[in-house]
Amino acid sequence: EAPPETRSGRSAALRARMEEQLLGARFRYLNQQLYTGSSRDAARLFRTDPAAFHLYHRGFERQVRRWPERPVQRIVRYLRRRPASLVVADFGCGDCTLAASVRNQVHCFDLVPLCPRVTVCDMAEVPLAAESVDVAVFCLALMGTNLQEILEEANRVLKLGGTLLVAEVASRFEDTRAFLKAMAHLGFRTVSKDLSSSYFYLLEFAKTGPARPGPASRLRLRPCLYKRR
Ligand code: SAH
């Protein structure tokens, strides 16, 4: 590599900076698409452009590395305190950190396989039998605008009394109480909520029964849009 004070060194540095900026811009654009479209749109997007998915993940990694704690580590800790016999479904598993960190059987679902354990599917329709899992996890993964459909799918695969864990970016919640009320409509009782981090909230629910019919009003999360840096 050319030393930075030489002309070719300077132009290499400039090129690297421009590539970085371009990557950042593409990440923000993809991220916006994921948060403003349905989960089906996301599935179509990544099916037609798998390279976009890898780019998205590099950007995602770069974002969460800035956080003092990764939400997935909180989920890992939670599961380690409970029996390893519990069957887990990880909706939007990313690089399968969760599955790799616990002894439980973990069904990993994502749109593109970042690792071999992933079952590729849209999280609104996972290939699991009804009432077959003890714990359903959405760790920074409630991205589609069809939130209700996605959470109804989690309800379907969860056993009665089973646990739903949601870790989401704090700023996405516009009215947490209204959100929790909407969750009750979908058959989820709030067991605990940790709103202490300014980065993400961690919510624990128990399945009380099937989702009630009709729209769960005020089941809304703001899109998580990153600013240009
Ligand atoms: N849970 C992981 C990854 C979070 S990033 C972690 O905490 O590290 C969000 C993940 O959700 C991405 O991997 C993205 O591809 C996935 N995702 C988004 N929409 C999805 C959909 N409709 N179906 C399945 N996975 C989806």
Image (cartoon, rainbow, N blue to C red):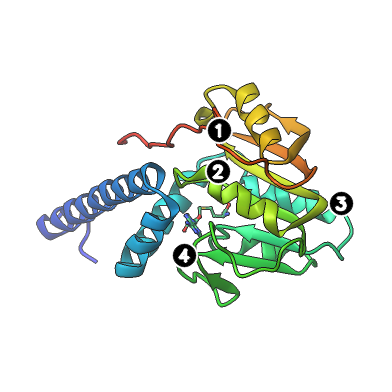
SS class of the residue under badge 4?
A: loop
Amino acid residing under circle 1: Leu
Q: Is the residue under label 2 in contact with that under label 1 (CB below 8 Å)?
A: yes
Amino acid residing under circle 2: Gln
Q: Which mark is residue 219?
A: 1
Q: Is the residue under label 4 in contact with that under label 1 (CB below 8 Å)?
A: no
Residue drawn where x is 33% and y is 61% of the image: 45
Which residue is identified by label 3? Answer: 81
Looking at the image, is mark 4 or mark 2 nearer the viewer?
Answer: 2
Q: Characterize the local packing of mark 4: few (<14), some (14-19) or many (20 or more) Cα atoms within 10 angstroms.
A: many
Residue drawn where x is 79% and y is 66% of the image: 104
Which residue is identified by label 4? Answer: 111
Can you tell me whether the CB of the residue at mark 4 lies under 8 Å from the nearest atom of ligand 1? yes
Residue furthest out toward the left: 7
Which numbered disc, 3 or 4, marks the residue that appears first in the sequence? 3
Total number of numbered discs in the rendering: 4
Q: Which mark is residue 148?
A: 2
SS class of the residue under badge 3?
A: loop
Amino acid residing under circle 4: Leu
Q: Characterize the local packing of mark 1: few (<14), some (14-19) or many (20 or more) Cα atoms within 10 angstroms.
A: many
**Distance between mark 1 and mark 3 Cα atoms:** 30 Å
Which numbered disc, 3 or 2, marks the residue that appears first in the sequence? 3
